[in-house]
Image: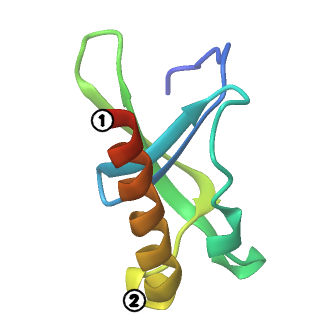
Amino acid sequence: MEEFIYTRSMISLGVGTMEIDWGKNSYFKDHSALFKPKDVKLIPYYYVGDDDKPLIIEKEGYSKKLKYVKKDWIYLVTHLMKSMTCLMK
């Protein structure tokens, strides 16, 4: 197994491999309200290896089925769409 040296932190909110929101270092939205401590599971983290091939490593992270966060998800998507609309003006 390769050893990684991390110089920056990154956080993302996604469905499958599709990222909905992400941030780097201390610049990210806190979506922790969508999760509870029991939602910590092994989840896939996607990287690119030295040979430019996809590398998937499982580590602990928050994960839950979308149907359990439906109301919060609708609010989040609405908020993101409003933010994107403001940026496009």
Question: Within the image, what quadrant is residue 37 found in?
Answer: bottom right
Lateral position of residue 26 relative to residue 2, left or right: right
Q: Residue furthest front?
A: 89
Question: Residue 52 lies in what quarter of the image?
Answer: top left
Residue occupying the point 26% across, 10% down = 51
Q: Name the residue rendered at 66%, 28% in the picture.
A: 9
Q: Separation of disc 1 and disc 2 at Cα?
A: 30 Å
- Identify whether 74 is placed above or below 63: below
Relative image position of residue 40 (x, y in whole percent): 66, 69
Residue 61 position, x and y percent, is 61, 57
What mark, if any, has residue 88 been given in the picture? 1
Q: Earlier in the sequence, mark 1 or mark 2?
A: 2
Q: Position of residue 38 (x, y in %)?
A: 71, 81
Residue 5 tag number: none
Q: Residue at x 68, y 25 (%)?
A: 25
Q: Residue at x 62, y 73 (%)?
A: 34
Q: Is residue 48 above or below residue 42?
A: above
Q: Is residue 38 left or right of residue 46?
A: right
- The one nearer the camera, 16 or 56, is 16
Q: Quadrant of the C terminus?
A: top left
- Nearer the viewer's eye, disc 1 or disc 2? 1
At label 1, which amino acid type do we have?
Met
Of residues 57 and 63, the one drawn nearer to the viewer in this rendering: 63
Q: Does 62 sit above or below residue 87?
A: below
In the rendered image, which residue does mark 2 sit on?
A: 67
